[in-house]
Structure formats: structure tokens, C-alpha cells
Image (cartoon, rainbow, N blue to C red):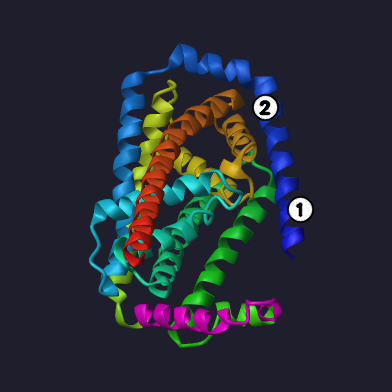
Amino acid sequence: MKFLKSKLNIIFLILGITLFGLFLYKFGIEAFNIIKYNINFFYLSLFILVTAIGIVPNTMKIKVILDSYGYKINLFKLIKQHVSAFAVSYVTPASRLGGEPLKVYMLKKETNVDYKTGTTAVILDKFVEVLGSALYGIIGLILLIMLFGIPLYFKLIFGFLVFLALFILYTIYYRVKKGKGVFSNVFLFLRLNRIRDWNKLTPTLRDIENKMGEFFRNHKKSFALSCFFYIINGIFFIIEFKFLLLSIGVTASIFQIILMINVWGLMNFVPTPASLGFLEAGQFGLFSILKGDGATGLAMTFVLRATYLLVVCLGFIFIILFSGKQLLKKKFKTRKVA
């Protein structure tokens, strides 16, 4: 299974690089010219500012969850961990999950949140995020149905993925809330417990499910508040994209922006670092339909990537500082023992 996963990642990476190279070769000069002749640094600055501020409600989701478990953690520490996890996720194939183990580890080392609670909080945070994305997907699906230029098969695939996500989320919520297994059952069904040293994970998964069930049953207000912060984060996404588009001289309605966000979110599930190539293809196709100019969509992705690379750099700075502190602590403990 590990070999198959590695092979699929390599295939998608090659496809992503090929797509990126193809779009860059055919439309790159046109896209860069759009940026060069239309760039508005005032709106670009606003885009960067709103992106930075938007990290706060995004981080508040997990803060609310951790608060419900009795861990009152400083928001700035959680923001550092969020940015660090984002940086790792951005450069790995699992763009929505790659940095989550790091977040769990940092929660343990920086704020003394035990691994089971940290893992539970991270899973619940992702649950809220995917739930919010699926609800945005429903809005996007309604808008897609209204657009005649988009192929029917794409609408059907998009609709299937949205409702599949909602079905999976409901199944997880219902079973976990009722004290029934989900992750542990899948783990056993796939016979992963037969892998050497993995058989010990089954009780851990059940503990995590119990903690999640306790949260859904006894902390409904915290769950609702976490969802509220995702809604705020979603509003920031719309404002971000509005300023992003204005920074290259493009005006778009709120409905068009929601479609762009949906395509961006959908491409994030493709197992390539930073959705390389697939993000360009998705936005190029959407802009070709909405604006009749795919190169503008390509220009938007270039500016978006440049900004996110700044966040990635900041995240790796946080990781380096965190690693340095852990090494110093380890060295100090070794000397103390000696």
C-alpha cells in the first residue's frame, strides 16, 4: 500500500509539473504581461493584509476546540503552529493534511497538550474546515448549474464530490456521537492492524473517537462557535480574492469569486505540492468560461502563489526556531542528567 501511494504521488507530481510547464510555455508571457501592465500595489497590499488577518479566525477554530478540553492556549502560539503546518502542507502532496502531524507535535512540545487530545483537536478542526468547504461547495454547485458554458460531466462530478463529502461528514458525526467506531473500524477493515507495530494504534484510535464523541455531545456551543469562525474565515476568503483580482485589474462578482474559491479548494485535494499545475488548469478553464480569457486566471494563480510562498517562508522560519528550542532543551536535559 505504501509503495502504491508513493507511485501515485509520483504520477500526480509528474502530471502537475507537465501541466504547469505547458501553461507556462503557452500562456506564461501573456499572464506575466497582465501582471506587469495591470498590477496595483495598493490592492496587492490589501490582499496580503487581509490574508494575514484571515489567519486569526482560521486559528480560532482550533482554539475554541482546545478550550473545550481545558487547554487555554495563547492565540499567537496557535497562529505560529498553524502557519508552520500550512508551510509543510503546501510543499507536500497532502496539501490539506501534510502539516497536521507537525501541529500535533508542536502542541505537545510547546503547550503540553497530550498527543491524543492534540490529534483529536486537529481532526475536529479539519472536520469543521471540510464541512464549511462542502457548504461552500453547495453554493458553488448551484452557480455551476446556472452556467451553460461548463460541461455537464464536470457539474455532475463536482456535485457528486460535494454530496459525498457531506455524506462522509454526517457518517463520522453520527457514529462518533453515538459512540460507534469510524476510524478504528476502517483501520481494522483494511487490516492495517496486521502491519508490524501498527496493532497498538487501534486502542489509540478508539480513544480519539471517544474524545470526539464527547466533544460533539457535550460541547455543542464550542462546535457551533468553531463553525462560526470558519464562516468568518470564508468571508475573509471572498475579500482576499476580491483584492487579489483587483490587484491585476480584474473585477468580479461575489458569485464568480465563490466559484473561483470552489475550484481552488477542489484542486487542493489533488496530491501534488501546492496543487502544482492543477490549480493553473482549473483557474485557466474557469476564467476562460467566466471572462473569456484564461491567461487572466493564470496571472491570478501566479500572484496567489507568490503571496503564499511568503507565508510558507514565514512558516519554515517558525519551524527552524521551534526545532532550535527543542534541541537546546534536549541538550540542557542531557547535561542535567550527566
Q: Which residue is drawn at 55% across and 17% down?
A: 32
Q: What stretch is highlighted in magenta?
A: 192-216
Which residue is denoted by mark 1 in the rendering?
A: 7
Magenta stretch, overall SS: helix
Toward the bottom, the furthest residue is 179
Q: What residue type is labelled 2?
A: Phe
> In which quadrant of the rendered view does residue 112 lie?
bottom left
Q: Residue at x 53, y 31 (%)?
A: 301
Place of residue 22 in the rendered image (x, y in percent of width and height, measured from the top left): 71, 27
Which residue is denoted by mark 2 in the rendering?
A: 23
The tally of labels here is 2
Toward the front, the furthest residue is 338
Residue in the foreground of this view, choosing between 171 and 252:
171
In the picture, measured across the screen, residue 139 lies left or right of residue 72, that is right
Place of residue 184 in the rendered image (x, y in percent of width and height, measured from the top left): 57, 81
Asked if labels 2 and 1 touch by Cβ distance under 8 angstroms, the answer is: no
In the picture, measured across the screen, residue 78 lies left or right of residue 166, that is left
Place of residue 101 in the rendered image (x, y in percent of width and height, measured from the top left): 49, 61
Q: How far apart are marks 1 and 2 (CA)?
A: 24 Å
**Label 2 neighbourhood size at 10 Å, few (<14), some (14-19), many (20+)?**
some
- Give whichever of discs 1 and 2 has the lower sequence position: 1
> In which quadrant of the rendered view does residue 113 lie?
bottom left
Q: Element under label 2?
A: helix
Q: Does the magenta stretch include residue 203?
A: yes
In the picture, measured across the screen, residue 78 lies left or right of residue 149, that is left
